[in-house]
Each structure stands twice: as C-alpha cells, then as structure tokens.
Amino acid sequence: MFLDAIGELAPTLQSKLLRAIQERTIERLGSSAPIPADIRSIAATSRNLAVEEGEFREDLYYRLNVITIQLPPLRGRRQGIPALGEERRLL
C-alpha cells in the first residue's frame, strides 16, 4: 500500500491507520467483522512530520519509520529530467 502525503492525514485517520497496522485487520464500511490483512506499506511526504507539535501521531510515525529513503528534489538532480520526459511504452 502506497500512502502518499502521509503528513496531510487527519488525526482520526491516523488512529485508524495505526490500528490496522498494529492489529493486522481492517473492517469494511458498514461492517463490524474484522478482516485479516497482511499489509506492507510505503509512506511518502514532502515535508517534515510535526510529531513534537502533536500534528502527527508519534506511535504511527515510529510504525512507519522503519527504513528512510531521502530523495533530493528534482532541482538538485537535473540530469534525471530528460529521462522523465521520455515516452515509455510497455509491450
């Protein structure tokens, strides 16, 4: 599961996501029966997560922050711009 802009996630959704990760179960909308879920996730953000300020749950942060991959902005690696502009076709 790819979680884009994780820093923008509302606090209520942060707690639901944390519960799903910890308990390895999810519930369908309108149901109360738990469904087992083997979830692997990648989370991305373009800003620092405000854990100290209380905007992002510390326990969720530590669940997601297992391996950190930092990519410099595209302006810092201009040699990659032409490759992004090339048309890619899948056969």
Image: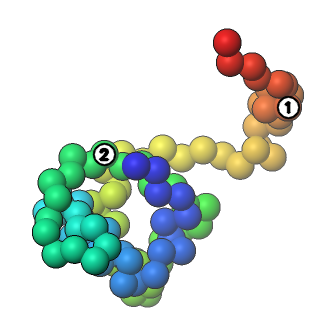
Distance between the alpha carbons at the discs numbered 1 and 2:
30 Å
Under mark 1, the amino acid is Gly
Sooner in the amino-acid sequence: mark 1 or mark 2? 2
The residue sitting at 84% across, 25% down in the picture is: 86
Q: Position of residue 16 (x, y in %)?
A: 29, 74
Q: Residues within 10 Å of mark 1 (few under 14, many from 20)?
A: few
Q: Quadrant of residue 89?
A: top right
Q: Is residue 88 left or right of residue 14?
A: right
Q: Is residue 5 left or right of residue 21?
A: right
Q: Who is closer to the viewer here, 53 or 21?
A: 21
Q: Which mark is residue 64?
A: none
Please tell me whether mark 2 sits on a helix, a strand or a loop: loop
Please indicate, yes or no, whether residue 6 appears anywhere in the rendered image: yes
Q: Position of residue 25 (x, y in %)?
A: 17, 60
Please indicate, yes or no, whether residue 60 appears anywhere in the rendered image: no
Q: Position of residue 2 (x, y in %)?
A: 46, 50
Q: Residues within 10 Å of mark 2 (few under 14, many from 20)?
A: few
> Number of marks in the image?
2
| Residue 89 drawn above or below residue 7 | above
Q: Disc 1 marks which residue?
A: 85
Q: Disc 2 marks which residue?
A: 40
The residue sitting at 55% across, 64% down in the picture is: 5
Under mark 2, the amino acid is Arg
Q: Who is closer to the viewer here, 42 or 77?
A: 42
Q: Who is closer to the viewer here, 22 or 72?
A: 22
Q: Who is closer to the viewer here, 91 or 48?
A: 91
The residue sitting at 38% across, 77% down in the picture is: 13
**Which residue appears farthest toward the top when viewing the image?**
91
Q: Are the residues at dot 1 and dot 2 in contact (C-beta closer than 8 Å)?
A: no
Q: Quadrant of the image for the C terminus?
A: top right
